[in-house]
Image (spheres, rainbow, N blue to C red):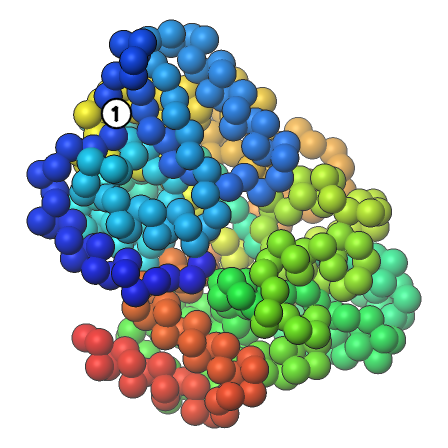
Amino acid sequence: MRLLAKGAVALTAIAVLAGCSAGAGSDTSGKTQLDWWVINPASPSASEAQEKIIKDFEAANPDIKIKKTNRAVDAHKDALRTSIGTAAAPDIYDYWAGPGLGGELVKNGASADLTAQYTEYKWPERFTEAALAPVTQYGGYHGVPWKLNGEALYYNKALFQQAGITELPKTLDELNAVAAKLKDAGITPIEFGGTVNWHVMRLLDTFLEGYCGSETFDKLVTKQANWGQEECVTESFTNLQKWSKDYFNPGFIGINNDESSSLFFNGKAAMALEGDWFNAQIQDNAAKPDDMGVFPLPTGTGRMYGFEQAMYITKDSKDAAAAAKFLDFMMSTPVQKETLGKFSTQSVNKEVKPTATDELSKSWEGIFEDAKGLYMNNDQNLSQSQTTEYWRIQNLVATGGLDPAKAGAEFQKFLDSSK
């Protein structure tokens, strides 16, 4: 999720451009056209599910046409940051619900407060408590929950067996030992794509949660603790450097996450740190899907690593009513039941319960049920500029360009200078 410098300029311009029109209008047939910008689906089956949602909605609402634009993660972010507040902005945009991403656009006036729509459609009664929390964190209601994802470690059972691993790790020390065993057996322990900074970030975030503990982790990401004074921060960066040097796939820094995922699908790497959406990708791509399992990140805190994505209606949409009607349809019980498992293993709709009986889905049910809270990806906790610096330091450490003992102080220096 590389953030380009031009994004900061675009956000600054929002206040100036806020009066411009955006989004919906009539197409040549006289229908209301809603522009919907959404991140590329994680699998072909997810893409088909999106197209069916549009087809079914348009059949039930012949006066409304949905124009969907899919983009890769980085391109999606850049497009939003340069278009929000202008006539080029969409009516509905897919985005994360963390304070550093969704909150960035809310703070800059991009998102409409949907309190009236939540009352009209009785959405507070529809969504789970966990799903509602992120969309109410800014005051009012910003965005409509559409998927809540957890992240964990997928593993290849045959490769674990080949390395003599008989028990799944429950602590970071045990995870470190598993990685060492795999390496000793001549197996690449884990795959990562380094050109997308957020992929490697997942492991660093995990180490911070595990070595620092939940309370200190939360203080660090809310700037209530000093990154340069916490020994656990140095321990986390030190372990990241160890893993990147000894346990990552060779050349990780030069490939993206899709390329590295293929190593896992084809049995060339034993683990992948991914979200529950990866279930569908395994079914679509893995040479031996039955060989794959998943277990929670063994941080010892009990919290699940994860995030929520919401569908936001832009503040300047010409037809927020039609946009809300589409989102109400998309999050309705029948549609959520039909698409369950395509985007995530759990629905944000409290009426929709998991029904899949395959091992991966059942494992995810347990992970969600056992979770004692949530810790989010740090690119959602931190601002755009802070995230960029976090990734810069992360990558320097991972590639041997920065002493891990200096990484925390380096990041704290940036935080202090950017206040």
* Residue at 50% in and 92% down: 403
Q: Horizontal placement of 413 versus 139: left or right? A: right
Please name the amino acid that badge 1 sits on.
Answer: Ala
Q: Is residue 121 above or below residue 36?
A: above
Quadrant placement of the C terminus: bottom left
| SS type, badge 1 | loop
Q: Residue 400's spot in the image, x, y percent?
A: 56, 87
Mark 1 sits on what residue?
Answer: 24
**Which residue is at the far front?**
28
Asked where in the image residue 378 lies, by quadrant, the reply is bottom left
Q: Residue 255's spot in the image, x, y percent?
A: 61, 64
Q: Label 1: few (<14), some or many (≥20) within 10 Å?
A: many
Q: Residue 231's spot in the image, x, y percent?
A: 46, 88
Q: Is residue 83 above or below residue 411?
A: above
Can see residue 394? yes
Quadrant placement of the N terminus: bottom left
Q: Is residue 220 above or below residue 158?
A: below
